[in-house]
Image: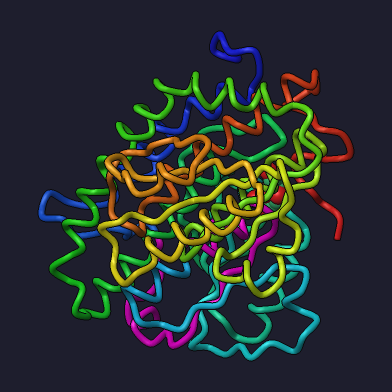
């Protein structure tokens, strides 16, 4: 049942092209229009939404943080992402025009369930993005958009994460479509680019040997830092979480722009630093700013490991290792850039002899608050 892989986690990493594909299937027509009738929410209600709050924990919350960039960009609806267990305890501002989007692989996470219940009591509309049919959170929500990643057995989430980002993007595009905003013309193109993601993930998986070898070679690392900017920031945090969970070593993700506001003090000779670099074709000057960050940590002795877009030659000067991911629009890059980080954590933890499917102290679904 592990499909010939040594662990469920490795199998599930390799399931990712299909997880994204299945989550996209049947949700748009040949004209490039989203058809999310399965949501069964009155479109008028969705048109009136003036605030979105994404509620989730752990990896699912990082999927929410990625989605925030896309939803705000496409829908122009203010979107917050909040850890479910913090939400109820801060007197949040929620009313009937607030759309709550919960994200949960299991659909049973008690913190998220309690947050959704609380939001419903305040009159909010609730949509659940969930991977488990008939689980509690979707049953208690007004609507559900299932991720079709298939059962996720390994405790550390991998394919569910990519499917959650995909589903949240579909929801964002659907809201943009309903509200008839200026992105109408682009929805079709974005859907076409999403359709190309599974083959691009497969390309990364076909070339995984190099990142696996790096993971094995760093089994003695005491701490690994991850930097990212824009959608690369939650990707960096997810990369760090995978390493904490699986390899039990200190790992932390930072917004690359924060470096000079504190974290750069951590950099000393030999400190491994992953940097998730935005596409050089992207807007603004984000690419060059992140390349400067690589240079800054390298100058202080860091071992720099860079995830960059194919063809990005500028990163080579300061990178000890470069892992290239296929070209894709900036907002879709997390669906690719996450994959090498998962493989790195898997390889490093396996080299240490740890059980990657059942890391110590963790449970697959956390059904207590
Ligand atoms: C990380 C991980 C956890 C879960 C979190 C939420 O690899 O698996 O952080 O993402 O416990 O679980 P769900 O999505 O089931 O609500």
Q: Residue furthest top?
A: 4
* Position of the N terminus by quadrant: top right
Front residue (pair 44, 61): 61
Q: Provide residue 283's location: percent of width, then percent of height.
A: 29, 68
For residue 53: magenta? Answer: yes
| 336 drawn magenta | no
Q: What percent of the width, then of the height, locates residue 266?
A: 76, 58
User: In which quadrant of the rendered view does residue 358 lie?
Assistant: top right
Indicate the quadrant where residue 234 lies. bottom right
Count of picture labels: 0
Q: Is residue 275 above or below residue 37?
A: above
Q: Residue at x 42, y 84 (%)?
A: 49
Task: Look at the image and tell me whether residue 1 can be seen.
Answer: no
Judged from this view, the residue extending furthest toward the left is: 31
The residue that appears at 70% across and 28% down in the rendered structure is 218
Residue range of the region highlighted in magenta in the rendering: 39-66
Give the colour scheme shown.
rainbow
């Amino acid at each position: 049942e592990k499909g010939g892989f040594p662990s469920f986690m490795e199998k599930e990493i390799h399931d990712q092209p299909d997880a994204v594909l299945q989550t996209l299937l049947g949700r748009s027509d040949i004209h490039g229009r989203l058809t999310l009738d399965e949501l069964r929410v009155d479109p008028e209600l969705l048109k009136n939404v003036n605030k979105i709050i994404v509620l989730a924990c752990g990896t699912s919350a990082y999927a929410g943080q990625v989605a925030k960039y896309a939803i705000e960009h496409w829908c122009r609806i203010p979107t917050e992402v909040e850890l479910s267990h913090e939400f109820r305890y801060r007197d949040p501002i929620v009313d009937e025009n607030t759309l709550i989007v919960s994200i949960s692989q299991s659909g049973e996470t008690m913190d998220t369930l309690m947050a959704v219940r609380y939001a419903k009591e305040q009159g909010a509309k609730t949509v659940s993005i969930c991977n488990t049919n008939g689980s509690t959170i979707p049953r208690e929500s007004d609507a559900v958009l299932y991720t079709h990643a298939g059962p996720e057995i390994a405790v550390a989430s991998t394919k569910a994460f990519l499917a959650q980002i995909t589903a949240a993007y579909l929801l964002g595009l659907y809201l943009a479509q309903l509200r008839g905003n200026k992105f109408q013309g682009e929805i079709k193109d974005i859907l076409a680019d999403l359709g190309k993601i599974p083959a691009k993930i497969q390309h990364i998986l076909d070339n995984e040997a190099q990142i696996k070898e790096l993971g094995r070679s760093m089994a003695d690392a005491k701490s690994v830092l991850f930097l990212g900017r824009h959608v690369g920031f939650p990707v960096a945090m997810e990369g760090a979480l995978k390493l904490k969970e699986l390899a039990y070593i200190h790992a932390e993700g930072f917004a690359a722009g924060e470096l000079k506001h504190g974290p750069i003090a951590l950099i000393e000779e030999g400190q491994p630093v992953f940097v998730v670099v935005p596409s050089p074709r992207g807007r603004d000057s984000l690419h060059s700013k992140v390349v400067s960050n690589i240079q800054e940590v390298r100058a202080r002795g860091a071992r720099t490991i860079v995830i960059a877009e194919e063809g990005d030659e500028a990163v080579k000067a300061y990178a000890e290792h470069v892992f290239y991911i296929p070209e894709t629009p900036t907002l879709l890059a997390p669906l690719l850039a996450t994959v090498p980080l998962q493989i790195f954590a898997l390889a490093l933890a396996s080299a240490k002899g740890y059980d990657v499917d059942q890391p110590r102290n963790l449970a697959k679904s956390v059904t207590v608050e």
